[in-house]
Image: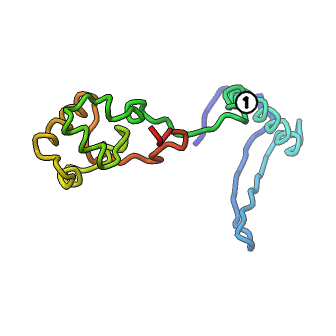
Amino acid sequence: GRLLIDASYCPVINVAVHVETLENGKESLILNIETNGTISPEEAISTASTIFADQLGSFIDIRNSVAPAEDQVLRPLIDPKLISPVEDLELTVRSANCLKAEGIKFIGDLVQKTEVELLKTPNLGKKSLAEIKDVLAERGLSLGMRLENWPPADIDLSR
């Protein structure tokens, strides 16, 4: 497209851009720069590149100021509720013992189980299942959730 203005003092009249694929699979950028003669096309691209680099500098400064320290490990954020022990759910003794016997220590372990899987647990019936579902729902959780990166590397599994 074109933008019509009443007067142009810009030394660059037109820029055409073309990308060619080379034999080695790489691409080559071809710029055809037409100027009014007050500056050369090389000088125009050099000036434009300098301005562009200066504009991007603010983003580089932001990235460096927000970058974590090298010793800080980047890991996905995990809802603290999921790292809590199952005891925090304050289930009945029967339900809590069934989960403990199955090796379900954390709420994150529990929410990944399906109803069918839990019903296969010895001594855990429909009443206990309903209790578990209700308690999880109160916390905005449900059975059958799929959690990526579970368990977290820094979780104490010996609890």
| Residue closest to the eye, 20 or 25 | 25
Asked if one can make out residue 7 in the rendered structure from this viewpoint, the answer is: no
Query: Residue 79, position in %: x, y?
Result: 42, 33
Check disc 1: other Cα within 10 Å, few if <14, some if 14-19, many if 20+: few
Quarter-of-image position of residue 55: top right
Quarter-of-image position of residue 38: top right
Residue 21 drawn above or below residue 45: below
Quarter-of-image position of residue 44: top right
Residue at x 37%, y 39% (from the top left corner): 106
| Residue closest to the eye, 123 or 120 | 123
Is the image coloured rainbow, by chain, by secondary structure, or in one colour?
rainbow
Query: Residue 109, position in %: x, y?
Result: 36, 44
Amino acid under label 1? Answer: Asn
Question: Which residue carries the number 1 mark?
Answer: 64
Quadrant in which the C terminus appears: top left
Query: Residue 77, position in %: x, y?
Result: 49, 35
Residue at x 75%, y 35% (from the top left corner): 52
Residue at x 25%, y 28% (from the top left corner): 90
Residue 2 drawn above or below residue 115: above
Q: Residue furthest left?
A: 127
| Residue closest to the eye, 103 or 26 | 103
User: Would residue 101 be found to the left or right of residue 70 on screen?
Assistant: left
